[in-house]
Image (spheres, rainbow, N blue to C red):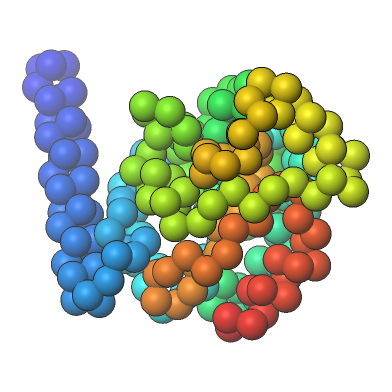
Amino acid sequence: MKHIRIFSIALAALLTLGACQQKAVDTATEANADNIYQFCVVDGFGDTVSLADYAGQVLLVVNTATQCGFTPQYEELQSLYTRFHDRGLEILDFPCNQFGEQAPGSFDEIHTFCTGNYGITFPQMDKIDVNGENAAPLYTWLKSKAAFGGFDLNDPRGAFLDAAFRAQDSLYDQNPDIKWNFTKFLIDRRGNVVARFEPTADMTTVNQAIAELL
């Protein structure tokens, strides 16, 4: 009986994913565009989510970590969400442990940390990879639409990261890979990438860009 139950759960998950993918494809086809709505993701509770569900909203897609020097940006992200959510902003949070292993722990641990310390109310997705052979298809697409924008070298953290990456690869800034936690992609109401903000970008700039789309 246990094996039958496990099989049933797995089958239900596959059917849900299949339905989600079909909805995503249908929505992207109707829009006649290569947009974010063609993708499905998994939220932190294991549910498959079609990004077509967010059609017509402005999206800010962020890869995050709980033990990073940029982690306090959660507070600023929540501030943006509180200010703009009723006007059509959605923030999609993707924890990622690829950068300094700064997002350890389970989703439950991450979610508890973020809600307890920063009071976040925007959706948190399951942990993913954003670079490499296991990168989520969504992030492969995002990177193809917006190149690395460069760190702010006037920010000590940006200068440090630039020096560290350049020591490993002098041309590191010429590939579109995500470089660090809290890289942000801004998506317009039609599902198109309109901006990429590196973690050292001034949040005032992010705020202004979002306001212009709403």
- Near-viewer residue (106 or 128): 128
Q: Position of residue 53 (x, y in %)?
A: 34, 66
- Near-viewer residue (83 or 154): 154
Side (left or right) of 84 relative to 89: right
- Circle count: 0
In this view, 33 is above or below 150: below
Q: Quadrant of the C terminus?
A: bottom right
Q: Quadrant of the N terminus?
A: top left
Q: Position of residue 212 (x, y in %)?
A: 64, 82
Side (left or right) of 196 relative to 130: right
Q: Position of residue 211 (x, y in %)?
A: 67, 80
In this view, 199 is above or below 9: below
Report the residue at 18% width, 31% height from top: 10
Report the residue at 64% width, 74% height from top: 210
Report the residue at 37% width, 61% height from top: 36
User: Can I make out residue 102 in this image?
Assistant: no
Report the residue at 71% width, 29% height from top: 166
Q: Position of residue 77 (x, y in %)?
A: 70, 58
In this view, 56 is above or below 103: below
- Residue at the far front: name it: 170
User: Can I make out residue 132 in this image?
Assistant: yes
Side (left or right) of 49 relative to 27: right
